[in-house]
Amino acid sequence: MSVLAVYSIKGGVGKTAAAVNLAYLAAQEGAKTLLCDLDPQGAASFYFRMRPHSKYSAKKLLKGGSHLENGIRATDYNGLDMLPADFSYRNLDIVLDEQKKSSQRLGKVLQPLHKEYGCIVLDCPPNLTLLSENIFFAADIILVPMVPTTLSLLSLKQLYTFLDELGSGREKVRVFFSMVERRKKMHQQMMQAMGGKQGVLAALIPHCADIERMGLYWQPVMAELPSSMAAQAYRALWQELTGGDTA
Amino acid sequence: MNSGEDTWIIPETLARSALEAQLAQHFDLEALPEYTAVVTYVDTFDWRLYQAGLILHVHQRSWSLYANDGELILLKGGPQCKKACSIDVFPEGPMRSTLASVIGIRALLPLAEVELQGRQLHLRNGDGKIVLRLVLEEQRLPGETHSFRMARVFPLRGYDEELAAVRTLLQAQGIVEPVSPLAGFEAGCLATGRKPLDYSSKFTLALEPQLTAREAMQRVYGELLTAMRRNFPGTMADLDSEFLHDLRVAVRRTRSALSLTKGVFSVEALKPFKQGFAELGHATGPTRDLDVYLLSEEASLARLHPELRSGLQAYFTDITRQRRKAQRNMVRFLGSSRVERLLLDWERFLTATPPPGGPLADKPIIKLANRIIRKHSQQVLRDGQNLDANTPDAEIHQLRIDCKKLRYSMEFFSSLYPEDAFAQLVKPLKAVQSILGDFNDLSVQQELLAATIRHQDLHKEAKETGKGVHRNALQEAEAEQVASLGALMQSLYEQQQPLRQHFAEVFASMTSDVQLELLNSLFGKQQRQP
């Protein structure tokens, strides 16, 4: 897989945690990996204690080439680089709108990076805009974390409708259950109803304190607590995504 | 090679604690645990890792491979490296794949022991983000007091300002003198009589045009004798197959030179050496031939239908056995006083002042070189002009030999000619040699297979004419093997025949006007147009 977009219309569903941990796993497995934090809130950047360069901005991202590459910084982990988010990303849609072929711009600026990076992970902002369209175009896999609730199901349907309107991308979607609380009846029922459907993965990420605490120790849970339940869950998710066995 | 631009000497007067205190004023310092270990530096005989900018060392079973850019690959629980180890003994993983692409079929040899003591510092900014890694290390030869104290800077992408700040800080502390991160390693090698890049299988020798033929050939032979001697121990100890290969090349080059430069030394005086080196060539042939088959094992298996592979494996098991025997015989011969005397006498002959000369002894070498290269170019051009898809095998073989002679003579004397023009001449010759060599290798392999199959068939016949013959397990295994060998032979044949279609085209690159003109301008006299 070369571009993995971790995407959700809804916020607060464990999206950034998934992006951070999967990027870490990709690098661990030997692929030089770039994590692009596209969310102006910069949560992924925060986890890696990283700020963007003072001269870096949304415009530089979309200019691509050296403008973009100068924004890349090494994380503390071997083989994992990051393009930290800048606050100007909140205007990404406006800047995009000024571009030619505005729905393919992101894919275009990422293209030359494949030479250096075997895997590019996008941590996407939670909305459904021109930027999302760019992300869907650029991604090989659109990975959607879904808290098993009826409301989440609604936003998943919205996503499919949007993709159908675009005319493609449905086949790229993979859904996994996130922040799962097994003792909640609704979670169980939702998972039962959706399990086994097209694009729905078997691996799930439980709701757990270790993941929430990532903000405290500023590290992927994979790095801080490699044998924790949370780490095992991400590993299983990664294996299922990359075609290995689901452990 | 590692430029060492980011490795610096720490002055004797600067204590590590003082340096760390300085750094701590500007960054949050995180010191990783102190390490102390006697590590063994490892490389191939011909310094393939060193040339690729890689440093490999092993401490017990823990291997560390450092790349130029500071990237580090670690392997715990790897193989031990007592005398030598090949890539096959490494477990699958990044260490093995990185090494394999660099060292190929050469074995890793322990070259030097160095005591390392130091620690890694993480320099963090106010956010707690690592912005630079710094290794402060002392390298010391075991038992010595002098040590190389060095600071190695590993920048992180995107943190250039911090890097600049650290550089300024180090400079202010008197850390200004660059040093090779391999300083301890190089000193360790010196202690064991080795020096980085002190061996290459390529023939390189600088000759001056005003030398007499006698002086020049003394040096050429001397260089080749050194190559033989250097590859002797590795060949005897069977460290990897390249030692024998390089040894044989040096012998072949010597024999070639003896016949190419007839008349430089007294014919009578050279007689025993001609004979001696011929013997040396023949005695080392069987082991090398079997090495070549064994090196093709993986590729050969891949050619076959999976069902046929086990039969071929049995064949290679047998070759391995034969090779062991051949190696034993060869070691006995190489260790004999006969060989020792040959090399000693040859050395004495070459260092005599002057060695007994022939009629050409005092001619300038450049004249002789011109003549030899001219003559053999003409020979190759003449033999090659009719080369096409239908040329008989025997003629192809002859042309291959001619090309080899030409190539050797060009190698001996290359330093007498302008580098670029010479390289331009060698390039098409290399291409011709490459295709002829491939063709020949495929022939030799097929011949061996054919001979093996015939031999097996005989066995079978004998068994079938005996009474009470029935299909027993032995026969089945034999049938399986014959089928595998047959299939392999066919596959080799199918690869070989299409090569013929390219002969004419590859050869044409040697006979272009530009090439012929270059020949004339470098070596004089008109070339005969093919």
Image (spheres, coloured by chain):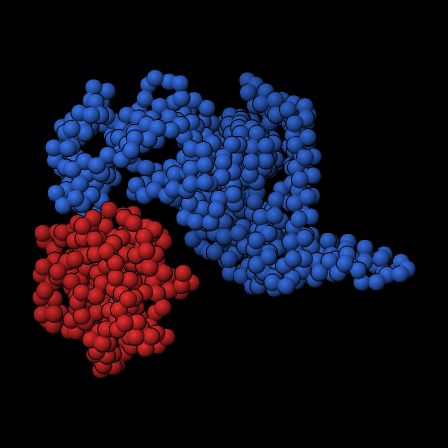
Chain colours: A red, B blue
Task: Name the residue nearer the viewer: B239 or A8.
Answer: A8
Relative horizontal placement of residue B73, taking residue A34 as reference (left or right): right
- The residue positioned 15% from the left and 73% from the top of the image is A129
Is the residue B72 above or below the residue A82 in the image? above
- The residue positioned 51% from the left and 32% from the top of the image is B82
Residue A77 screen position, x and y as percent: 27, 48
| Residue B302 position by quadrant | bottom right
Relative horizontal placement of residue B112, taking residue A37 as reference (left or right): right
| Residue B342 position by quadrant | top right
Residue B459 screen position, x and y as percent: 81, 55
- The residue positioned 76% from the left and 58% from the top of the image is B473
Task: Name the residue nearer the viewer: B57 or B237.
Answer: B57
Is residue B399 visible to us here? no
- The residue positioned 81% from the left and 56% from the top of the image is B458
Is the residue B382 above or below the residue A3 in the image? above
**From the image, which quarter does the C terminus of chain A lie in?**
bottom left
Residue farthest toward the right in the current orientation of the protein: B467
| Residue A139 position by quadrant | bottom left
Task: Name the residue nearer the viewer: B370 or B275.
Answer: B275
Residue B400 screen position, x and y as percent: 59, 49
Task: Name the residue nearer the viewer: A204 or B282.
Answer: A204
Residue B173 screen position, x and y as percent: 16, 26
